[in-house]
Image (spheres, rainbow, N blue to C red):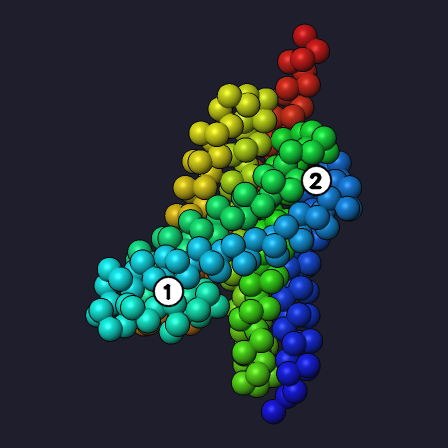
C-alpha cells in the first residue's frame, strides 16, 4: 500500500509527462515557435479550466438525475455525486454529449480569454497551437484526477490507466481542440466568419469526443474494439497534421495576395 504522498507524486508525473510528450510533438508543427511564456500560460489555462468543467458536469449530472432517476435518488444528487464523481460517471447519451460539449467549450473559452486575444496571436497556425496546448494542460490535470485513485489501488493499475489515457484521452483532447483551432485558423483573415467557424469547430470536436466516449465506455468492448477506437483517433490525428499544412499554406497564400 503506497502512501498518499507517493500516490500524489505518481499521479502528477503520470498526468504531466504524457501531456508534455504530446505537446512537444505538436509544437514541432509551428515553424515560428510561440513565446515559451505563452505556451506555459496556455498549458496552465487548460488546468484552470478543470474546476469549471467539474462544476458544469456536476450540474448536468444532477439534471440527468432529476430527469431519469427515482425521486429519492435525484434529490440527493449533489450529495451522492459531487463534481469529481460526476466527472467520471457518464451513464447515458445525455451525459456523454453534455460532458463532451462542456469540456470542449471550457478548453476553447480558456484559450480565448487567456491567449487568443494577445498580440502574439498573429498568424493562423497559432490558433491550432494554442488550442492544442490548452487541451493538453486540461488533459494533464484530468489525468491526475483519474490516476490518483488508480495508484492508490496499486502501482500496476496506475500504470495501466496511465498508458490508456496517454494513448486515448490525452490524444483525444489534443485532436478535438485541434479541430476547433483549425476552424478558427481558417477564419483568421475573415473575422466576420470567425464566430460561425468556431461554433462548427466546437460541434465537430464534441461529436468526435462523444463518439470516443461511447466506444471506450461500451460494456462489451474488447481489446480489438479498443485498438480500433485508438486507431480511428490516431488516424484523425494524422488528418490534423495535414490540416496544419493547409493552414501554413493559407498563411503563405495570404501573404502573396497582400503583395499583389
Q: Is residue 100 among the parts visible in the rendering?
A: yes
In the image, is residue 58 above or below residue 10?
above
Mark closer to the observer (1, 2): 1
Residue located 63% across and 66% down the image: 15
Direction left: furthest residue: 70
* Residue 70 position in % (x across, y down): 21, 70
Q: Name the N-terminal-most of marks 1 and 2.
A: 2
Residue located 59% across and 22% down the image: 189
For disc 1, the marked residue is 90
Which type of secondary structure does the marked residue at label 1 adopt?
A: loop
Q: Nearer the viewer, residue 184 or 77?
A: 77
* Residue 53 position in % (x across, y down): 49, 56
Quarter residue 222 falls in: bottom left
28 on left or right of 54: right
* Residue 256 position in % (x across, y down): 68, 16
Direction top: furthest residue: 260
Quadrant holding the N terminus: bottom right
Quarter residue 32 falls in: top right
For disc 2, the marked residue is 30
Q: Local crowd at mark 1 within 10 Å, few (<14), some, or many (≥20)?
A: some
The alpha-carbon separation of the residues under discs 1 and 2 comes to: 36 Å
Q: Local crowd at mark 2 within 10 Å, few (<14), some, or many (≥20)?
A: some
Which type of secondary structure does the marked residue at label 2 adopt?
A: loop
Q: Nearer the viewer, residue 227 or 172?
A: 172
Direction right: furthest residue: 36
Residue located 42% across and 58% down the image: 57
Amino acid at each position: 500500500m503506497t502512501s498518499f504522498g507517493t500516490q500524489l507524486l505518481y499521479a502528477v508525473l503520470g498526468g504531466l509527462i504524457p501531456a508534455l510528450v504530446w505537446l512537444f510533438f505538436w509544437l514541432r508543427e509551428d515553424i515560428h515557435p510561440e513565446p515559451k511564456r505563452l505556451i506555459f500560460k496556455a498549458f496552465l489555462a487548460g488546468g484552470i479550466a478543470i474546476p469549471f468543467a467539474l462544476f458544469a458536469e456536476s450540474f448536468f449530472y444532477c439534471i440527468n438525475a432529476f430527469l431519469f432517476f427515482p425521486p429519492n435518488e435525484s434529490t440527493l444528487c449533489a450529495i451522492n455525486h459531487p463534481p469529481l464523481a460526476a466527472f467520471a460517471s457518464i451513464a447515458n447519451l445525455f451525459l456523454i454529449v453534455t460532458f463532451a460539449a462542456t469540456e470542449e467549450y471550457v478548453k476553447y473559452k480558456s484559450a480565448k480569454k487567456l491567449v487568443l486575444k494577445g498580440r502574439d496571436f498573429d498568424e493562423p497556425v497559432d490558433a491550432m497551437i494554442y488550442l492544442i496546448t490548452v487541451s493538453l494542460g486540461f488533459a494533464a490535470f484530468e489525468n491526475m484526477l483519474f490516476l490518483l485513485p488508480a495508484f492508490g489501488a496499486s502501482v500496476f493499475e496506475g500504470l495501466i490507466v496511465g498508458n490508456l489515457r496517454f494513448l486515448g484521452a490525452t490524444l483525444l483532447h489534443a485532436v478535438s481542440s485541434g479541430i476547433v483551432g483549425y476552424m478558427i485558423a481558417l477564419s483568421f483573415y475573415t473575422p466576420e466568419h470567425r464566430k460561425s467557424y468556431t461554433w462548427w469547430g466546437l460541434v465537430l470536436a464534441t461529436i468526435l469526443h462523444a463518439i470516443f466516449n461511447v466506444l471506450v465506455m461500451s460494456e462489451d468492448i474488447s481489446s480489438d474494439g479498443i485498438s480500433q477506437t485508438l486507431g480511428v483517433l490516431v488516424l484523425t490525428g494524422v488528418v490534423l497534421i495535414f490540416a496544419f499544412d493547409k493552414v501554413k499554406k493559407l498563411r503563405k497564400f495570404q501573404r502573396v495576395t497582400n503583395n499583389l
